Image (cartoon, helix red, strand yellow):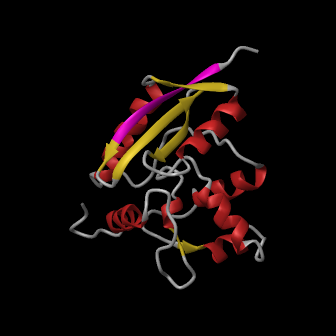
C-alpha cells in the first residue's frame, strides 16, 4: 500500500509556535513546535498512519488555523474540526475524555482516572495526557495537579497558564 501524506503547517499563536497536521481530511497534529518530544510524536504519527510529513497546507489545516484564530480572539469555545488519533486504545480513551472537559474548567489527573474507571492509574492517565498530539483541540491544558497547581504541559507552564487565563476570561492574556 502506498504511503499517504500528513500535511503540516506552522502557526504562531499568542502562546507560542505550533505545528498543525492533517491526515485523510482530519486533524492529527496540533503540537508545540519547540517541545522536546516533537520528533517522537511526528515519528509515531508517521508510523501509525503509514504516512510521511510534508510541509504543505491543506483544507483541514487552514480550517484549524481559522478556528484557533477565533479561539484566541474569544469568539470560539469549542471546535468543529474532525480529529484522528494516533495512539493506543487507552490513550484514545483518555483523549476522548479530555474532549468532555468544558471550556474554562479544569480537572485533576486523579479525577480523570476515576472517570475512566481506573482510579489507581493516575500515572498512566498523566502519561497518556502527555502523549496528546492535538493540543488545544484536545484540551490537555485543562488538566491540573490534585493540589490545584499547574503541572506539566508540552507547550510549557507559561503557555498552559495563558490558555487557562484565556478560557477563564482574564483581561490581560498575552
x then y, percent, for residue 132: 59, 52
Spot the residue most to the top. Answer: 2
Spot the residue most to the bottom: 147
**Left or right: 14, with 151 as reference point:** left
Residue 47 or residue 39, whichever sits in front: 39
* Quadrant in the rendering for residue 93: bottom right
Compared with residue 54, is residue 129 higher up or lower down, i.e. above or below?
below
Q: Compared to 76, does 82 lie above or below?
A: above
Residue found at x 43% / y 48%: 34
Asked if the stretch drawn in magenta spans residue 5, the answer is yes
Query: Is residue 110 in the magenta section?
Result: no
Pinpoint residue 162: horizontal percent, then vertical percent: 34, 64
Q: Which residue: 47% across, 30% down?
A: 8
Q: Position of residue 102 (x, y in %)?
A: 50, 64
- For residue 58, what is the image quadrant? top left
Quarter of the image with the C terminus is bottom left
Q: Is residue 34 left or right of residue 22?
A: left
Write down the region rendered in magenta.
4-11
Residue nearer the viewer, 120 or 151: 151
The N terminus lies in which quarter of the figure?
A: top right
Q: In percent of the image, x 64 and y 54: which residue is there?
A: 96
Amino acid at each position: 500500500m502506498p504511503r499517504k501524506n500528513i500535511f503540516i503547517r506552522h502557526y504562531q499563536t499568542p502562546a507560542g509556535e505550533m505545528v498543525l497536521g492533517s491526515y485523510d481530511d482530519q486533524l492529527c497534529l496540533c503540537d508545540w513546535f519547540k517541545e522536546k518530544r516533537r520528533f517522537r510524536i511526528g515519528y509515531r504519527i508517521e508510523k501509525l498512519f503509514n504516512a510521511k510529513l510534508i510541509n504543505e497546507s491543506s483544507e483541514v489545516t487552514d480550517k484549524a488555523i481559522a478556528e484557533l484564530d477565533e479561539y484566541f480572539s474569544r469568539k470560539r469555545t469549542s471546535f468543529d474540526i474532525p480529529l484522528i488519533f494516533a495512539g493506543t486504545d487507552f490513550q484514545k480513551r483518555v483523549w476522548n475524555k479530555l474532549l468532555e472537559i468544558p471550556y474554562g474548567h479544569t480537572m485533576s489527573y486523579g479525577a480523570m482516572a476515576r472517570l475512566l474507571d481506573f482510579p489507581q492509574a493516575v500515572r498512566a492517565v498523566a502519561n497518556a495526557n502527555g502523549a496528546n498530539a492535538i493540543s488545544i483541540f484536545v484540551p490537555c491544558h485543562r488538566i491540573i495537579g490534585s493540589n490545584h497547581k499547574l503541572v506539566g504541559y508540552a507547550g510549557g507552564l507559561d503557555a498552559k497558564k495563558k490558555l487557562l487565563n484565556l478560557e477563564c476570561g482574564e483581561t490581560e492574556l498575552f
